[in-house]
Amino acid sequence: MLDDIKVLEQEIQQFEIKDEDQLEAFRLEFLSRNGKVQSMFKNMGKVPKEDRAKVGKAMNQVKVLAESKFEDAKLALDQDQSKDLSAKDDITLTSPSWPLGSLHPLTQTLEEMKSIFYRLGFTIADGPEIEDDFHNFTALNFPPNHPARDEQDTFFIRKSDDPDMQDLVLRTHTSPVQIRLMENTEPPIRAIMPGRVYRNEAVSPKSYFLFHQVEALYIDKNVSVADLKETLITFAKLMFGTGVKYRLRPGFFPFTEPSLEMDVWWGSEQDGKWLEILGSGMVDPNVLKHAGVDPEKYTGFAWGMGVERIAILRHGIDDIRTFYENDVRFLEQFN
């Protein structure tokens, strides 16, 4: 057995390793699971007991020899490879610069709006984009024959004549989140509802079938129109600057009474015009009842605004479609 170990030792010493292929061949022949070193250990049971200490020591020495030769050869080959790379490549050269991306202008606008409402004490609520008829229309005081319930205005996922089966739509506003929030939360409630909404509108420079809204809801005891006006004016000044020119005028919405619309002046003093940015009002008592809130105890206000409309005002954009065309020339202006 000792003679066999001596022969294996000589084979290991004489094996030449000059490249990666020879290194792998050495590993397979001597150090793999079925290699000669492992096979040698499998024969240990055939060695007489009185010789096992001497034979075991010799086996371990051969194993260490093979492992050391493998590691030394691998290190030498790695060093040679590094020298070759150093000779070919100038690692002191500055790497090419790549343009950095940025948030989409709608995302930037939405994040700024959320930041303002955080500062005003509002939290964020979210809800499904596929809504049932009750949360999208009925609970918000839309009468059965309202035009918004028609297929020419709304994208229907399911429209049924079965009175026991509710229609399903792509939500036309984020107001359903207000209903769900009131159903599951005890007042006081102070939250905004940002998200995508869908309407069956003709695509034009001023309208699109998909857009983003931020709605808000404040429910508590003794909430008044004065609170609503102060909140809207504060938002306008924080969003557009303290010098913003704004106006509040009466409006109508099924889910608020009284209702107000807010406009800001867009353009120069001579050539500008008023542009509506949001609709708002005091939450209608019927809406509170549908959501399980006592209108004799609580009042509140709500409003909704389009993120695209705010972004258009902020950046002087004249075509809403540019937000969705993924034109790099347009998006690079917001890096």
Image (tube, rainbow, N blue to C red):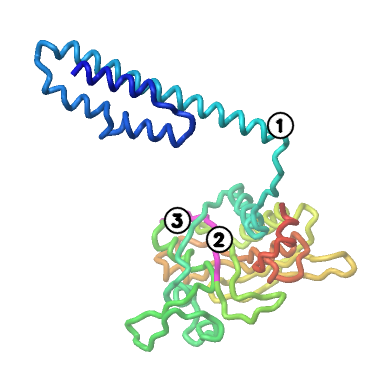
Residue 194 among magenta residues: yes
Q: Position of residue 24 (x, y in %)?
A: 40, 35
Q: Nearer the viewer, mark 3 or mark 1?
A: 1
Q: Earlier in the sequence, mark 2 or mark 3?
A: 3
- CA separation, marks 2 and 3? 20 Å
Which region shows up in magenta? 186-197
The tag on residue 92 is 1
**Disc 3 from disc 1: Cα separation:** 64 Å
Above or below, 270 against 102 in this view is below
Mark 1: which amino acid? Thr
Q: Nearer the viewer, residue 83 or 167?
A: 83
Q: Which residue is mark 3?
A: 187
Q: CA distance from mark 1 to mark 2?
A: 49 Å
* Amino acid identity at mark 2: Pro
On the image, the x and y values in percent for residue 91 come to 68, 33
Judging by the rendered image, the residue that carries numbered circle 2 is 194
Asked whether, in this view, residue 53 is left or right of residue 203, the answer is: left
How packed mark 1 is, by other alpha carbons closer than 10 Å (few <14, some 14-19, many 20 or more), is few
Mark earlier in primary sequence (3, 1): 1
Mainly helix, strand or loop, the magenta region? strand
Check disc 2: other Cα within 10 Å, few if <14, some if 14-19, many if 20+.
many
Mark 1 or mark 2: which is in front?
Answer: 1
Q: Is residue 263 magenta?
A: no
Q: Left or right: 245 with respect to 126?
A: right
Q: Residue furthest right?
A: 270
